[in-house]
């Protein structure tokens, strides 16, 4: 029987690439995301790879919506083998100008949602004696940048949560790992260019060259496929003794 993967924030960027990677291997896909055409994107991917799917528009800011999404997925497919906590958002501003509501939203979506989703899948994974939880953290889960207080705090928190769940899951065949990408060319990066330009008083090209790629030893964006393939590896049955790690996929950023 086909396995099922639930990927939050999977109608764009890294989550969407991950969905395609798992669909190509026959997984049922539970899509989620706030893109207005999310249902169409989910249907197109599922049709292309001829796999079962569900699209949930659950907003990761709200625990009740997360619980409903997980319950619907288990009702549709019988189980969830892989959970990828990937939905994320960013805001860039100096701390004294950082809007309170942006802080709260970033902590909710980038950190608390992973707790609520993990809690919601726990009994299912524990009872089946198998689970793979992969948290898409960031190099910002290991290093800081100015003007990203909420994001850096959330991603560091997500790395800590990953380790805790690795310890709790080990007796039940559940692994939990974090992936820490460097800069990947997706919407979340493109959207922050104007904010970065304002905060650093730079042109948009200077932001790409002097802020984003300056951190990378390899002066390229991290390929989106590499992040999806890393998730595939960590989700494999063979990776059962890898747990509790925060794996940089970051073009050498955290070698500094
Ligand atoms: P993206 O903007 O393309 O995708 C983000 C996804 O999250 C979208 O589908 C969006 O709808 C969803 N999302 C945002 N808020 C949501 C909410 N409240 N409820 C439900 N869904 C919500 O960006 P991406 O680069 O693919 O980001 C995916 C993850 O990778 C994020 O957690 C991000 O922090 C992380 N990451 C990205 C980079 C990068 O450089 N792109 C680097 C490191 C980590």
Image: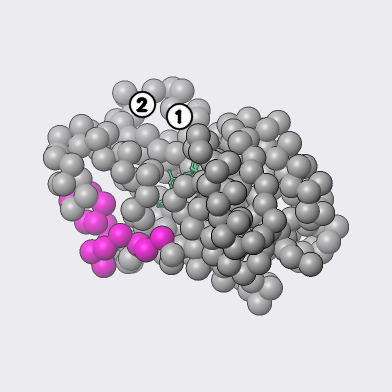
Q: Which quadrant of the figure contains the N terminus?
A: bottom right
Who comes first in sequence, dot 2 or dot 1?
Answer: 2
Where residue 73 appears, x then y in whole percent? 74, 47
Most extreme residue toward the bottom is 238
Residue that label 2 marks = 98
Residue depicted at x 23% and y 64%: 219
Part of the protein shown in magenta:
210-224
Residue 152 appears in the picture as rendered: yes
Residue 39: in magenta span: no
In the image, 12 versus 49, the foreground residue is 49
Q: Is mark 2 within 8 Å of ligand 1?
A: no
**Element class at badge 2:** loop
Residue 222: in magenta span: yes
- Mark 2 and mark 1 residues within 8 Å of each other at the beta carbon: yes
- Say whether residue 77 is left or right of residue 140: right
Where residue 22 appears, x then y in whole percent? 59, 64
**Element class at badge 1:** helix
For the residue carrying disc 1, how many other residues have a C-alpha within 10 Å: few (<14), some (14-19), or many (20+)? Answer: some
Residue that label 1 marks = 103
Where residue 66 appears, x then y in whole percent? 67, 37
- Say whether residue 131 is left or right of residue 58: right
- Say whether residue 186 is left or right of residue 84: left
Residue depicted at x 68% and y 73%: 237
Q: Is mark 1 within 8 Å of ligand 1?
A: no
Residue 160 appears in the picture as rendered: no
Dividing the picture into quadrants, the one containing residue 191 is top left
Where residue 18 appears, x then y in whole percent? 53, 59
Calculate the distance from the C-alpha at mark 2 to the C-alpha at mark 1.
7 Å
Residue depicted at x 58% and y 67%: 24
| 204 w.r.t. 104: above or below | below
Residue depicted at x 45% and y 39%: 89
């Amino acid at each position: 029987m086909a396995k099922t993967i639930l990927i939050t924030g999977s109608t764009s960027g890294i989550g969407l690439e991950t969905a395609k990677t798992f669909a190509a291997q026959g997984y049922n896909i539970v899509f989620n995301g706030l893109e207005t055409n999310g249902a169409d994107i989910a249907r197109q991917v599922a049709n292309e790879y001829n796999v079962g799917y569900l699209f949930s528009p659950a907003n990761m800011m709200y625990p009740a919506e997360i619980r409903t999404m997980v319950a619907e997925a288990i009702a549709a497919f019988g189980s969830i083998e892989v959970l990828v906590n990937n939905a994320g958002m960013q805001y860039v501003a100096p701390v004294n100008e950082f809007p309170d509501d942006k802080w709260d939203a970033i902590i909710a979506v980038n950190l608390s949602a992973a707790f609520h989703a993990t809690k919601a899948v726990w009994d299912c994974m524990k009872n089946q004696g198998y689970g793979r939880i992969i948290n898409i953290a960031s190099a910002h889960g290991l290093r800081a940048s100015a003007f990203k207080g909420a994001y850096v705090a959330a991603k560091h928190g997500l790395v800590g949560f990953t380790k805790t769940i690795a310890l709790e899951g080990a007796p039940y065949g559940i692994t939990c790992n974090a992936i820490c990408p460097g800069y990947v060319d997706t919407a979340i990066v493109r959207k922050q260019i104007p904010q970065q330009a304002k905060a650093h008083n730079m042109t948009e090209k200077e932001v790409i060259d002097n802020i984003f790629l300056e951190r990378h030893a390899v002066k390229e964006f991290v390929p989106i496929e590499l992040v999806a393939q890393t998730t595939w590896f960590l989700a494999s049955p063979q990776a059962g003794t890898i747990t509790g790690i925060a794996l940089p996929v970051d073009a050498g950023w955290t070698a500094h």
